Image (spheres, rainbow, N blue to C red):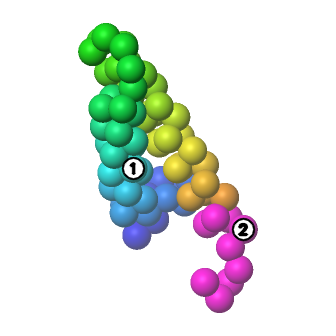
């Protein structure tokens, strides 16, 4: 099922949230500094990871070979 005009499927959104959550958790746990700064850093990196995931998925869906 194709959701929206971007060409993303429902599972792509779920996968994006999983990737962003894992990256956020890893960065928050491994970063150094006060807890507040670690949480903010984790959130920022998680958002960046989500954007990269969406862009990558869109590019793959657009330019992948037909036999995939």
Along the horizontal axis of the image, is 62 left or right of 29? Answer: right
- Looking at the image, which is closer to me, 53 or 63? 53
Q: Identify the residue at horizontal 47%, vertical 31% (top origin).
A: 45
Image quarter hosting the C terminus: bottom right
Image quarter hosting the N terminus: bottom left
Residue 52 marker: none
- Looking at the image, which is closer to me, 38 or 33? 33
Q: Position of residue 35 (x, y in %)?
A: 27, 15
* Mark 1 vs mark 2, CA separation in Å: 22 Å
- The residue sitting at the bottom extreme is 67
Q: Position of residue 10 (x, y in %)?
A: 37, 61
Q: Identify the residue at horizontal 33%, vertical 45% (top origin).
A: 22
Q: Residues within 10 Å of mark 1 (few under 14, many from 20)?
A: some
**Which portion, as a residue range, is magenta?**
60-68
Q: Which residue is mark 2?
A: 63
Q: Which residue is mark 1?
A: 19
Quarter of the rendering containing residue 37 = top left
Q: Position of residue 24 (x, y in %)?
A: 36, 36
* Residue 34 appears in view: yes
Q: Position of residue 5 (x, y in %)?
A: 54, 53
- Residue 62 on the magenta segment: yes
In front: label 1 or label 2: 1
């Amino acid at each position: 099922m194709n959701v929206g005009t971007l060409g993303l499927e429902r599972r792509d959104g779920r996968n994006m949230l999983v990737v962003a959550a894992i990256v956020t958790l890893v960065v928050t746990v491994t970063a150094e500094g006060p807890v507040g700064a670690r949480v903010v850093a984790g959130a920022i990196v998680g958002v960046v990871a989500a954007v990269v995931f969406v862009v990558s998925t869109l590019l793959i869906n657009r330019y992948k070979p037909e036999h995939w």
